[in-house]
Amino acid sequence: MSETESTAGRQVRRSGGAVPQRRRRHRGRWTAIALALGVSALVGPYLLFMRDDPEAMTIDDAAYYEFVSVHSGNALDVAGADNADGVRIQQEKRSTSAASQQWRVKPVGGGYCQLVNHNSGKVLGVPSGSTAQANVEQQSDTGAATQQWKLTDVGDGAVKIVSRSTGMVLGVNDGSGADGQAVIQSTDRGGTVQQWKVTRAVTVATPSAPTVAAMASGPSHSASTTPSTPSTSRLAPGSGSYTWRNVQIAGGGFVTGFVFNPNRKDLLYARTDMGGAYRWDGRAGQWVPLTDWVADWNMLGIESVATDPVDPERLYLATGTYTNEWAGNGAILRSTDQGRTFQRTGLPFKLGSNEDGRSMGERLAIDPANHGTLYLGTRKNGLWRSTDYGVTWSQVSSFPVKDGGSSGVGLSFVTFGPAGSRTIYVGVADKTTSLYRSTDGGSTWQAVPGQPTGHLPHHGVLSGDGSLYVTYTDTPGPNGVKAGSVWKHTPSSGAWKDISPIPGDGFGYAGLAVDPQRPATVMVTTLDRWWPSDELYRSTDGGATWKALGATSVRDASAAPYVGTGIGHWMGALAIDPFDSGHVLYGTGAGLWASKDVTAADSGRPTHWTIPVKGLEETAVLGLVAPPGGKLISALGDIGGFRHDDLNKVPAGASSGPRFSNTTGIDFAQAKPNIVVRVGYSDEQRGAYSTDGGVTWTPFAGAPVSAAGGGTVAISADGGTVVWTASGQVPHVSTDRGKTWTASSGLPKGTAVVADRSTAGSFYALSGGTLFASTDGGRSFTARATGVAGERLKATPGVAGDLWIAGGGGLSHSTDGGASFTKLSGVQSAAAVGFGKAAPGARYHALYLIGTVNGIAGIFRSTDGGTAWTRINDDRNQYGGIAGGVITGDPEVYGRVYVGTNGRGVLYGDQS
């Protein structure tokens, strides 16, 4: 999915998005700072180097460290352990279990380093352009000087952290010792407020999993189950037949690979990092989703795709989103009808489609000489082989690499040599030995002599003339790449040649394609060339000369206007149509671009590009609101969100003024539904309000906490009071549309607040099993009920004190403002609950539920307050178990429901 891969609440891709794992890297010597490794307490002996000491000790750049304020004893932390870009850095009480307090010290040369957060994988940086005192934040790695720091010895086992871009040092704002106080860059004042002690984390904390609110596992739809206890909820016998469509957004996530079938015209597949796989329908001019039937969210991440060159009906998908402990094992999905139906083979290891290196590939390949044999390069488990069309798999014991290599991401591609040669090449993301070859059909393997070292192979493609082209980056990407190259290998002579279009200084090369009809025609893309922009290069003479296509390209973004007409970013996937040399596609962090006349560049003419992305919807949904009399408004990861004036048309532009990257919270005033508020992250203000139902927006003039953002927001029924819980902060109240803010009392940090949908002065919150209530406009909260189960609190539109709580243990309802709750025993789990227009003759809103009712998992509707439920999705429309947990009904159209997914965009269902 796109740039951020984490969620705030459910971080995104795309952030991210990948949840980082500890990577196995070469230990490096670095003399900017020397620490006594293994010291677990601040009272222990620290060995800091003297700047002129030639015997400086080494620092383990694969280990994690805590930075503890000498002044306060608190640790450097990311607010709310959030994974999004722009989250402020602050001090918090030390916790050995907090991955957000652990940092990897990564040398970048010149005595400087990056501080890489263990929980998010992102780096500590200064907001762009800040040259004066400013808060610091976590950012995606761009290699900028604003993300580089020098650790300088100040004596007594302490350091100061000095910015490369400004020369300023990090310290705690205002010298406060309080938890949650911001960390800022400011002029060096020499006091303990700007000094930090550094200790290695003996226990490496586990990064938090992305919060995926999927349906609880349970019997399948066809299973026969009898509840073990009597239930007041039952499955209604009435019709639940629904038609499901995407609300049109167009793209919105990271397209990580394209695969053409070499022998069937127009047979093309696309893979995404967390939104499933697609097949191109040329006649309809749109993409067909192939994995909407999947009920396990982990299988919506597509690590690799293979289409059979002998039998084009056969398709294979390697699925699995994360390799962390909390993720399930991967699987191979096998189809004999181009993805219309699948059979599943479980794998005994994990795959990582939303982790670093996700645009490498293809890792899954079919032997063209024996199409029943497949190879799979894995991230942690070496090379695997199937000889029965993917039904069973075994490890290739003779392959030398059986772990993640020096980068931790393992094998990057598998490709076959010329027909009849029995040659197989396998790329390994290792800076020492990165390319292996077998010349006996995979029985034995040798490192290819003369290969480049120091970089990681991203793609390897064999040309029709026998040449092997390889693109390289210095890190797996898609972020943090600062070097790379393009190489050409001639197996007949053993020669290697660097054919990079321009030196990869500050960026790498990722996307790679060779024209099957023209063996000397090669195309490559840059990766992380943030300035002036990434580039697409084309050569027609085997890499001897190159043309850059960006400046002369003509771009039409009308199919996805929010993308703009720039060339794109995260360009790791590139493909040339084997039947049409002019047809080229490349993926970006927000979708794709395609051209039908790329050969025009060969004669000096401009190339023309469009965004043929219809049908491919890959946004991660963080919130949805449907105000009465208004239009659906979405809160999305990576691209902010939209007002959807027509569900079947792509919006003209994303919500702006300001435009957010992640919109993490959204709400509207029930009695004045044109008043809408949203919060999130941006380089501008991080909160905004609208008085015209989301058509236009005005930024909040103030902020509850300097540089804070994200989190959740609620607005009173009359639109007069806004309560914003920014990430990692206590809730704050504003009664002047965000000009001034006052801290609420009575609630822990990070507690989400919801407004009563009828009584203007009433707000509610749920934390640690306690239901809190406020009757003074959110200024203070007191406990109203304890021992309350569940995680997600919702208030019923127009009914005072009517509350619902959804959670892994089921669904509970209160009609007295949270003083007491009744649990609906027939609902075993509830990821989310929402409200829509009441059924004809009904007195209560229609309820919509993502969860499990009487042993059946799905999306449900109740028209009688939760007594009876009808399943309204089916086994063809499961969308990863509706990971994401966002649902709301339409207040004007009975039966219509909107569902937010974690990688398949916004869905809406209507009764058939």
Image (cartoon, grey):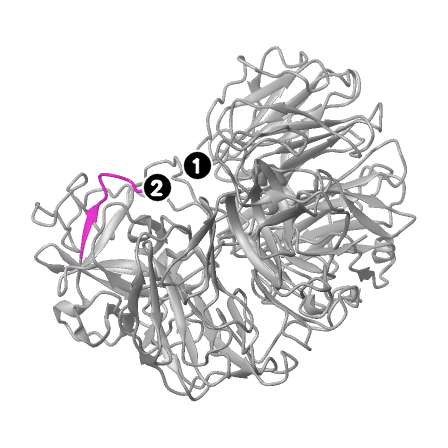
- The residue type indicated by label 1 comes to Trp
Q: Residue shown at 74%/46% (left/top)?
A: 238
Label 1 to label 2: alpha-carbon separation = 10 Å
Residue 360 visible to an observer of this rendering: no
Question: Is 787 placed left or right of 794 in the picture?
Answer: left
SS of the residue under disc 1: loop
**Height in image: 343 above or below 161?**
above
- Residues at circles 1 and 2 in contact by the CB criterion of under 8 Å: yes
Q: Position of residue 30 (x, y in %)?
A: 28, 46
Q: Is residue 202 magenta?
A: yes
**Height in image: 739 above or below 96?**
below
Residue 326 is marked as 1
Question: Is 890 placed left or right of 583 in the picture?
Answer: left
Of the pair 122 and 241, the residue shown nearer to us: 241
Question: Is 783 placed left or right of 682 in the picture?
Answer: left
SS of the residue under disc 2: loop
State the residue position of label 2: 206
Q: Residue shown at 62%/50% (left/top)?
A: 903
Q: Position of residue 207 (x, y in %)?
A: 38, 45
Report the span colored magenta. 197-205
Give the farthest residue toward the right: 283
**Height in image: 240 above or below 734?**
above
Q: Position of residue 471 (x, y in %)?
A: 62, 41
Q: Is residue 217 magenta?
A: no
Of the pair 178 and 579, the residue shown nearer to us: 178
**Height in image: 671 above or below 225?**
below
Q: How many residues crowd around disc 1 within 10 Å: few (fewer than 14), some, or many (20 or more)? A: few
User: Where is residue 899, by image quadrant?
Assistant: bottom right
- The residue type indicated by label 2 comes to Thr
Which numbered disc flags the more N-terminal residue, 1 or 2?
2
Q: Position of residue 766 (x, y in %)?
A: 37, 60
